[in-house]
Amino acid sequence: MAKRVYEAWKGSNKFILGGRLIFGPDARSLLVTLLLIIVPIVIFCVFVARHLRHEFLNNNVGYAILVVAIVFTIFVLVLLFLTSARDPGIIPRNSHPPEEEFRYDSAVSVDVGGGRQTPSLQFPRTKEVTVNGLPVRVKYCDTCMLYRPPRCSHCSICNNCVERFDHHCPWVGQCIGLRNYRYFFMFVSSATLLCIYVFAMSALYIKVLMDDDQGTVWKAMKESPASVILMAYCFISLWFVGGLTGFHLYLIGTNQTTYENFRYRADNRINVYDRGCLNNFLEVFCTKVKPSRNNFRAFVQEEVQRPPPSPAPREGVSADDLGADPRPKVEDDLEIGEDLLKISQRRNIDEIDEDIRSRGSNGPPHNTSDADSVLGSDHRAPTIRADARHSSWGRRSGSWEIAPDVFANSNVTESRSYVTPKEARQ
């Protein structure tokens, strides 16, 4: 039964629902992220928002605090799902290297046995393409066997080449690339706003307790320890998600990825993708998300394995030097050895016939069966006729037929032996 693409996938990704959802190999960390979001919100709704429902003259305001927290959390979880459960922009790998880029380097040779040398198969490791009028060097990926497009990089965790690769995020268990970067930024920024909201509402509840009891901050904090825990948790989380949001705002404004930011800064290279702050934001948030290059639920189509291309012959270079398969040459030697054996057998028969004729002229006639007594009935060589033989570059093929008169003798059987050149010379 034919396999589907996700079943024969060579990357490290994990699939669920029959290949409809794709995750990174560290998808389990997504459960930790879910707990870090859901647990604080549950505590907030039970111990803070529920008590704030009746603290306002208009009860709708109190209920709105609870509803906003729930809806906002669902929105953040949806963005997390869109970030981690979709193809980030994986480029399908090739089953063989690009043949149009092959070249043969005679300076680098490989020993193929027998003292013969074959030129090493080489192709350029980098290529230059033009982006916005400036040259950009793209590299060849040995794993995916393709030249990576601009802004593409190979993720060592997912083992895939990803378009506009930003980074691999362990918190979402997925690569961040061309097709999910928008959702990743919205997830991080929304989580930042959610932290601010929970922190603010928890502080508001502390203030309400202080006003109701006419007490101090410490007394209010003792009355609602959950609010204190939530404020501390949100304050710490803001350093992470808030700082990440600010950093990616800078990256979007300059049209960079996290990978490019570190690489360009280290190499002191010019950013050729910067189109201006406004256009950069429009490119990220207002362009249509490209469809996936992979149909994970499609059936795998078996591709016929193509042999590696043979180099064109050059002047002064023989086929053996180009690394031709030595087996056709061995078969040629076997054919030549067979020819030598047949010739020697025919020569022995001619000598015996000549001896019989000479004795027949000087003495009583002898029957041709004497020849059989000399050779033996089981070793009588059949008369052989060689058909037209044709040779090609790699091997020589021939068909041998036994003459019709041979079949008159029932004791004659066709025998075909393969003699090595060494035995033929002996």
Image: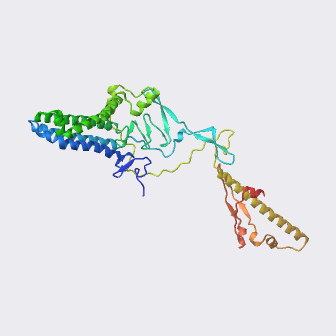
| Camera-side residue of 348 and 210 | 210
Q: Position of residue 45 (x, y in %)?
A: 19, 42
* Quadrant of the image occupied by residue 402: bottom right
Q: Work out which residue is located at the far left of the displayed protein and give it.
A: 57
| Camera-side residue of 131 and 100 | 131
| Camera-side residue of 39 and 152 | 39
| Residue 70 visible in the current orientation | no
Q: Position of residue 108 (x, y in %)?
A: 63, 39
- Up/down of 52 relative to 333, above or below: above
Query: In the picture, which quadrant includes the N terminus?
Result: bottom left
Q: Position of residue 239 (x, y in %)?
A: 31, 33
* Quadrant of the image occupied by residue 92: top left
- Up/down of 425 relative to 245, above or below: below
Counting the numbered discs, the total is 0
Q: Position of residue 91 (x, y in %)?
A: 42, 41
Q: Work out which residue is located at the far right of the displayed protein and give it.
A: 362
Left or right: residue 226 compared with residue 167: left
| Camera-side residue of 280 and 291 | 280
x 25%, y 40%: residue: 75
**Colour convention of the picture:** rainbow
| Residue 421 visible in the current orientation | yes
Query: In the picture, which quadrant includes the C terminus?
Result: bottom right
Left or right: residue 216 compared with residue 125: left
x 65%, y 52%: residue: 328
